[in-house]
Image (cartoon, helix red, strand yellow):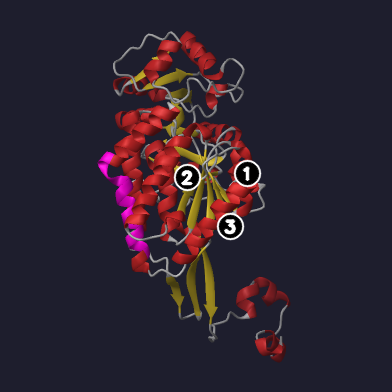
Amino acid sequence: MVTHSVAATLARARAAQAQAEHWSQDRVDAVVAAVGWRCYAPEQARALSTLAHDETRLGDREHLYTLHRRRVLGTLQDLHGVTTVGVVEDRPDLGVQKLAKPIGVIAVASPSTAPCSGVIGNALPMLKTRNAVVFSPNPSARISVLRTVEVMRAALAQVGAPVDLVQCLEHSNRETAEALMRAADLVVAVGGGGTVTRAYMSGTPAISAGVGNATVVVDDSADLREAATKIVHGGGFNNGTSCSSESNVLVDATVEVPFAAELARAGAHLCDEQETARLRTLLWNGDGRLNRDVIGRSAATLAAEAKIQLSSDPTSVLIARVPDVDLADVLFTEKLAPVVTLTPYRHFDDAVAAVAAITDACGRGHSCGIHSHRPDRVARLAERVRLCRVMVNQSTAVGNSGSFENGLPFTSTVASGSWGGCAQSENVTWRNFVNYTSVSRPVQRQLRTEEELFGGHWSAHGRSVGPVCDALYDDTLV
């Protein structure tokens, strides 16, 4: 029954995609705009973000609404004017033209965090590239994803496009998800480690997100007020449920005191040793596993549960002050909560080493940040860490997945490269949802001499071989 249900869904998706396969660019753009607007409209965005919060109980309702509209708008900005039909690259000097082609049917395993905006953020670039998409939602967000897909299908119907370009499995569990992954042409997996592992084991080409645990350095040249404001905003945004949320902060010991004061001014509560211990026990049940009953809750809720008397109102982030980096301490792992560690360092190279160690243990390949006005330090950090993103003087949570204030493209899938077990090391965008056909015509290429290619090796040992060399470059002799 499961296999039959998935097969029927895939058959409808393939039939719909076959209709879109040869659409013109104008037709594609009209469809994307229609779906985008239906999801962006304030009333609809409000309804979907409210539904997501009510169903999952994760994050903040207002933040989900802001994230929803921002992601739709940002994704459409990135897609606007982009050519995804026909010739997308023409190199007369090489005699090569590239034509973009759709992949076919894409299976998306979507998470429970920000489910509606995540689904839309995947669907828009997939429609832009003339693919069909079938979503397999996390069970805790099933109703939200089904409703979001209904909204997109209504928009498709309104412009006369096949509604089965966007579908959702009615009954989503591990068995149906695995069957969908095996039958699709590409898998995009956003969620827990188990989901990602199953995607790569499906036998279908796969792209995934990685585990986050963004660690941020604040050095002695930073604008402490600006750094604190951005860290508190990012660490508390949507109750810290983003994989890009500020999770750990390493601050130069010489500015730790004034920086802590700025954190408090920005709306953070700095926990003492006993409060930090109670918070640790609450979040990890005392056994190292995240407490699913409290993740994604507000700082005020966590404080009440951990019997922490808040020092400011409102409080958006709880700061767990830890004197040294201890990789055995669960506080240095991904938290999915508005909780940020704060640890001093004495030498900048120690901070760089700590970022590398923390993210290698949890968050490999994903992201880090630095607040500094020393370009040499930014360069040193970027050169030494095995991470795909280094965010400079900005919030990792707000900027990693695309921003109107940086050049990173908007995405619902923040990949972590081979370091994090991902097939991609950049934000996943429409470029990951096309195949290319290369048309090659004969040209006379400018060739390097053997001496240029082999350098000193040629000078020391080589000699002109005349016709022999010419023969190597003559394709008619192959």
Q: Nearer the viewer, mark 3 or mark 2?
A: 3
Question: Above or below — where is 113 with respect to 98?
Answer: above
| Residue 244, visible in the rendered structure | no
- Check residue 33 for magenta coloring: yes
The secondary element bearing badge 2 is classed as strand
| Residue 342, visible in the rendered structure | yes
Dot 3 and dot 1 residues touching (CB under 8 Å)? no
Reading the chain from its start, which is encountered first: label 3 or label 1? 1
The secondary element bearing badge 1 is classed as helix
Dot 3 and dot 2 residues touching (CB under 8 Å)? no
The spot of residue 219 in percent (x, y) is: 41, 32
Q: Amino acid at mark 2?
A: Arg
Q: Nearer the viewer, mark 1 or mark 2?
A: 1
Mark 1 — residue? 2
Mark 3 — residue? 185
The spot of residue 95 in percent (x, y) is: 50, 81
Q: Which residues are magenta?
A: 28-43
Mark 3, Cα crowd under 10 Å, few <14 / some 14-19 / many 20+, is: some
- Residue sitting at 51 percent across and 15 percent down? 282
User: Quadrant where the N terminus lies?
Assistant: top right
Query: Residue 405 or 125: which is nearer the viewer?
Result: 125
Mark 2, Cα crowd under 10 Å, few <14 / some 14-19 / many 20+, is: many
Q: Quadrant of residue 194?
A: top right
Q: Which mark is residue 389?
A: 2
Mark 1, Cα crowd under 10 Å, few <14 / some 14-19 / many 20+, is: some
- Check residue 81 for magenta coloring: no
Query: Residue 208 or 132: which is nearer the viewer?
Result: 132
The spot of residue 248 in percent (x, y) is: 47, 28
Q: Amino acid at mark 3?
A: Asp
Reading the chain from its start, which is encountered first: label 3 or label 2? 3
Question: Above or below — where is 119 with respect to 315?
Answer: below
Label 3 to label 1: alpha-carbon separation: 19 Å
